[in-house]
Image (spheres, rainbow, N blue to C red):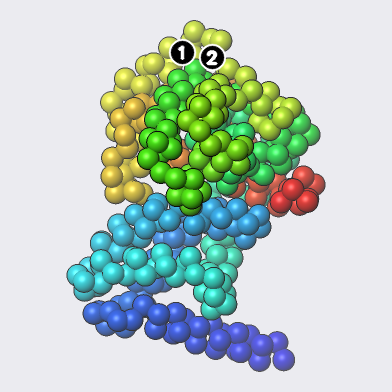
Amino acid sequence: RKIEKIETALSESHNRFQRIINTFEPYFSDTEVVEKWLIDAMMCFFSTFSDDWVSDLCYKANAIARREDSILDVIRKRTTNNKELDKQDKEILPKKFLHMILTREPDITNFLWEYGTAAFSAKLIKNSYTTDDLTLDTFKDSYCILDTNILMHIGLESSEYYKSFKVLENIFKELGINAGILYITQKEYLTAIRYKKEQIMSLVAKYDKEVLEASNDQYLQTAIKRHCRTEEDYNRFFSNIEQIPNYIYKETPIYLYDDDQALEDRIAKAQSDETKLSELNSIYKSVTGKDKKEYVLIHDVGLINGAHYLRENGKYFILSQEVSVNVYAKKRPFVKNLPIAMRIQTLLNALALNGNAHIVNDDY
């Protein structure tokens, strides 16, 4: 009976795969070549975005849809390097792949489930983020260094991570995790917010409310939820946002960790080190196919090396959504059982697998 069930499941999986392949028609390459490409593209997708997929699966975070540009860049680069595909297919197939993973149909959902669960299982067995490595005890009394891309989501009701911060705060309180930022992150945050303000104010001056409401920008949507209508309202909104967030959600304070001249010296030295800058830029380029913006690169090198310094005497880790920082972390050894950096989804998934009560609750 079990054998029959397995054979039935295998047959359905094969038939489903053929139906999926048919959705990519018309194409110019041989079908066998396209089949191999799709398998490779799926493996590439889940090797880079599995945390986002798991986050969507468990928490309905809409993370995959919000990262569609990054996904398209990664699949395009992978497809470009495929020597068997017809040149015309290299332009068409990545777009069809993106459309496929964003489509909510039973065949697609089951197809993603097959690859996603396999990728997640492999990750637990092979890579550095295993349940054995990341236990609840690992995080107790540790220090979380927040990257700029985390700060820029805190306090925004329309952020994809808004509910995550409420859960994180409960976890941080329970495990005694201290949250903070480096001075260089404070500077980058203020620069990024001022740039965002210019963008939003330009849109507010040009478009009607109906057009603004159709935007998926988290700042604009949060401002609208707070009943901003006039330019004065939006200016008032940004005057609050321009202040560094004081708390993860409402109670866990965010500290400034730069109270050590040796730390500042280590950061400054790293930021002028061409080898370190080149290494991180190469990681970013290997994933996205383009160079990292110089000011962002300088910040991230400083962030990583500031964390390295702090980890010499304490349990510190970076919380970041940035791709090169996390890929860099996977290539570095753990210190006190902690990776140097991880995503919000990775942290929540690891704690959920270890039975933390705050992960499975009504907030998610």
Residue type, label 1 = Glu
Is 294 on the left or on the right of 221, as rendered?
left
Q: Pick the quarter of the image with the N terminus.
A: bottom right
Q: Quadrant of residue 276?
A: top left
Is 142 on the left or on the right of 50, as rendered?
right
Q: Along the polypeptide, which appears first: circle 1 or circle 2? A: 2
Contact flag, marks 1 and 2 (Cβ < 8 Å): yes
Tell me the residue at 43%/26% (across/down). 194
CA neighbours of label 1 inside 10 A, class few (<14), some (14 to 19), many (20+):
some
Q: What number of labels is visible?
A: 2
Q: Secondary structure at mark 2?
A: loop
CA neighbours of label 2 inside 10 A, class few (<14), some (14 to 19), many (20+):
some
| Closest to the observer, 258 or 94 | 94
* Res. 74 visible in picture: no
Residue type, label 2 = Asp
Tell me the residue at 44%/64% (across/down). 43
- How many angstroms separate mark 1 from mark 2 (CA)? 7 Å
Tell me the residue at 62%/19% (across/down). 255
Q: Quadrant of residue 125?
A: bottom right
* Res. 45 visible in picture: yes
Tell me if residue 346 comes above or below residue 251 in the rendering. Answer: below
Report the disc number at residue 264: 1
| Closest to the observer, 339 or 349 | 349
Residue 240: x percent and y percent?
Answer: 57, 24
Tell me if residue 157 comes above or below residue 250 in the rendering. Answer: below
Report the disc number at residue 258: 2
Q: Quadrant of residue 296?
A: top left
